[in-house]
Image (tube, grey):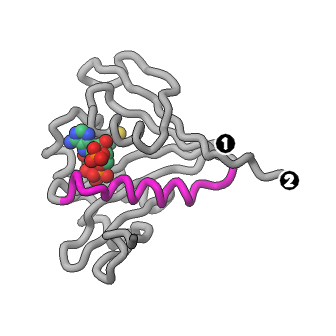
Amino acid sequence: MNSPWTGRQWQWRSLTPADLPSLTQCVELVYSHSPNPVGGAWSEEQLGLEVQHHCSRAGFFEPFGLTCFVLWQELPDACEIRLLGTHPQWQRRGLMLHLLRSVIKQIPRGKELWLEVHAGNRSARNLYEQLGFLEAGRRPRYYRDGAEAILFSYRPLFPPEKD
Ligand SMILES: CC(C)(COP(=O)(O)OP(=O)(O)OC[C@H]1O[C@@H](n2cnc3c(N)ncnc32)[C@H](O)[C@@H]1OP(=O)(O)O)[C@@H](O)C(=O)NCCC(=O)NCCS
């Protein structure tokens, strides 16, 4: 069966500096509508640096615009997801599952993917567990509200490439 996210109104691609206004607006909406604590706020300047220097993938629906995004950074041994979110009007339709699966396919062979999440963020924890992320550790009193961060790690099944 075809994915509902592949019609001609959909575009899946990296973010560019031109997307910064819609990304900033989407992040603000995602944060302000979240029933779960999500973590620290991001300024437009910080988001601009992320888009410029790190990796991203996002889903755009014409004529709506940006519906969901993932920002991640490639480190020597791993990839770290820095920020992700789905626009409040598009949540709970399977969009982030779809987007994260495509991000996982882009992770270089042999690297693990990890992220940290506010312990009270049940939606995100459910999402990562559904995708096969495993809890890899905890950072006590990590967030400003005193909550701990849970570290999640996803290890691709294939072995690392040989030199
Ligand atoms: C977490 C978030 C990214 C999920 O995006 P989404 O596109 O709505 O997620 P999906 O529709 O693909 O849902 C996939 C799974 O995630 C979990 N999930 C998503 N929203 C949930 C909710 N409100 N309550 C419980 N579980 C939820 C479920 O396991 C869901 O699978 P199911 O619908 O089969 O039960 C979105 O709620 C969001 O942007 N939250 C605020 C930002 C945030 O928390 N970012 C993560 C910081 S680490």
Ligand 1: does it lie within 8 Å of the C-beta at label 2?
no
Residue 42 visible (yes or no): no
User: Secondary structure of the magenta portion, mostly?
Assistant: helix
Q: Is residue 72 left or right of residue 26?
A: right
Which residue bears the numbered disc 2?
A: 163
Q: Quadrant of residue 68?
A: bottom left
Kindly identify which numbered label has been placed on residue 45: none
Ligand 1: does it lie within 8 Å of the C-beta at label 1?
no
Residue 30 visible (yes or no): yes
Question: Which residue is pictured at 35% across the width and 42% down the height?
Answer: 127
- SS at badge 1: loop
Which amino acid type corresponds to the residue marked 1 in the rendered image?
Answer: Asp
- SS at badge 2: loop
Kindly identify which numbered label has been placed on residue 77: 1
State the extent of the magenta-drawn residues as a range.
90-109
Crowd rating for badge 1 (residues with CA inside 10 Å; few <14, some 14–19, many 20+): few
Chain-order first, disc 1 or disc 2: 1
Q: Is residue 82 magenta?
A: no
